[in-house]
């Protein structure tokens, strides 16, 4: 399963690096509906918590594609670790 | 369809945070009995894949984009309890690291994309599997799960007084039928790829056949 994990993680990272910079920039379904129906501004005040990589971009990296790709790598690895962590945590809880 | 802060009133987001928190707790208990050497690494890979795939917005009609959600894929492979935990991991990272989905709306987003997307999506798959082939069931469950998540999102917005249901529902459901078709095709492709490369992963305990 270590091989599967490494290959799987690499495939995910490849998607984030090679495809994410070319993803559509159009608003998504909910955003578009909010825009059309006039309630988008309700969600546009300061968010409650500041996120380190807002809007999938790496602060300080000017090139938009590179910025997205870097944010994608970081996010993919953090998400991998988070889900793995949850998996081990629930397992450990059972063992106790 | 990640809901940002500000779209939901306190009553709605608190209620959904409690419901989702409870569901994630129950899923953890169930998953603790089922998660083994194969499932735990697969949870990590699945979450990483879903996170990356959710970055890939594809254009749908009228200046709108959509992206893969992944609930049905995760649940078919890992079962609904681990599927919900995978979706929760993705949504928590998106919220805290990328400001995608508000902190107050996290419970609502877990409800829509995890409980409806993954858990209900799993049972939709089982129902569709009774009447159709595997491919058709995967497609139908993916499509319907997206549309139902969008319906739930509309209801939450309406209850919050953000937008009337009769305005939000047709618009949200309509665009998410298109996004749901994308969801179905991607889920079929991902399962097809796994079936060719690692067919054993489609047979691990807990997942759906």
Image: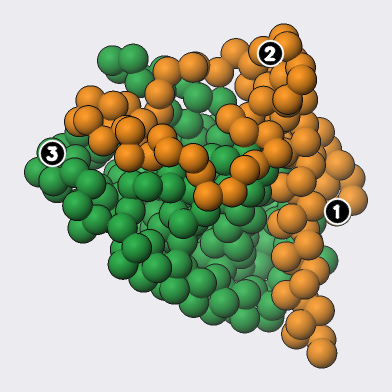
Chain colours: A orange, B green
Residue situated furthest left in the rendering: B166
Separation of disc 3 and disc 1 at Cα?
Answer: 48 Å
Q: Which residue is mark 1?
A: A1
CB under 8 Å between callouts 3 and 1? no
CB under 8 Å between callouts 3 and 2? no
Residue situated furthest front in the rendering: A46
Q: Nearer the viewer, residue A60 or A83?
A: A60
Helix or strand or loop: what does disc 2 sit on? helix
Residue A18: image location, x then y, percent: 71, 17
Q: Is residue B149 left or right of residue B67?
A: left
> Pointer 2: residues within 10 angstroms few (<14), some, or many (20+)?
some
Q: Nearer the viewer, mark 3 or mark 1?
A: 3
Q: Is residue B18 left or right of residue B40?
A: left
Q: Chain of mark 3?
A: B
Q: Are marks 3 and 1 on the same chain?
A: no
Q: Nearer the viewer, residue A10 or A52?
A: A52
Q: Chain of mark 2?
A: A
Can you say which quadrant of the picture contains the C terminus of chain A? Answer: bottom right
Q: Residue at x 89, y 51 (%)?
A: A2
Count of numbered circles on the image: 3
The image quadrant of residue B43 is: bottom right
Q: Residue at x 23, y 47 (%)?
A: B162
Task: Please indicate, yes or no, whether residue B69 appears anywhere in the rendered image.
Answer: no
Q: Which residue is mark 2?
A: A65
């Amino acid at each position: 399963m270590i091989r599967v994990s490494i290959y799987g993680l690499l495939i995910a990272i490849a998607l984030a690096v090679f495809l994410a910079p070319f993803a559509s920039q159009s608003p998504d379904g909910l955003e578009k509906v909010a825009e059309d129906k006039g309630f988008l501004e309700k969600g546009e005040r300061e968010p409650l918590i500041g996120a380190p990589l807002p809007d999938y971009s790496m602060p300080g990296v000017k090139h938009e594609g590179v910025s997205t790709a870097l944010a994608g790598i970081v996010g993919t690895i953090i998400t991998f670790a988070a889900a793995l962590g949850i998996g081990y945590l629930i397992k450990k809880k059972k063992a106790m | 369809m990640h809901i940002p802060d500000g779209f939901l009133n306190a009553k709605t987001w608190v209620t959904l945070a409690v419901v989702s928190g409870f569901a994630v707790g129950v899923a953890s208990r169930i998953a603790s009995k089922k998660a083994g050497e194969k499932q735990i690494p697969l949870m990590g890979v699945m979450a990483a894949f879903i996170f990356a795939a959710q970055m890939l917005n594809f254009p749908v009609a009228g200046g709108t984009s959509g992206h893969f959600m992944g609930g049905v894929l995760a649940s078919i492979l890992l079962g609904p309890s681990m599927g919900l935990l995978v979706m929760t991991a993705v949504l928590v990272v998106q919220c805290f690291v990328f400001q995608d989905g508000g902190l107050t709306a996290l419970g609502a987003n877990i409800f829509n994309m995890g409980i409806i997307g993954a858990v209900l999506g799993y049972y939709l798959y089982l129902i569709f599997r009774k009447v159709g082939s595997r491919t058709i069931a995967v497609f139908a469950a993916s499509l319907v799960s997206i549309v139902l998540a969008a319906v739930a999102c509309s209801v939450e917005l309406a209850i919050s007084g953000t937008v009337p249901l009769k305005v939000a529902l047709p618009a949200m459901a309509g665009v998410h039928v298109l996004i749901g078709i994308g969801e179905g095709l991607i889920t079929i492709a991902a399962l097809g790829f796994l079936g060719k490369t690692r067919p054993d992963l489609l047979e691990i305990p807990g997942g759906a056949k």
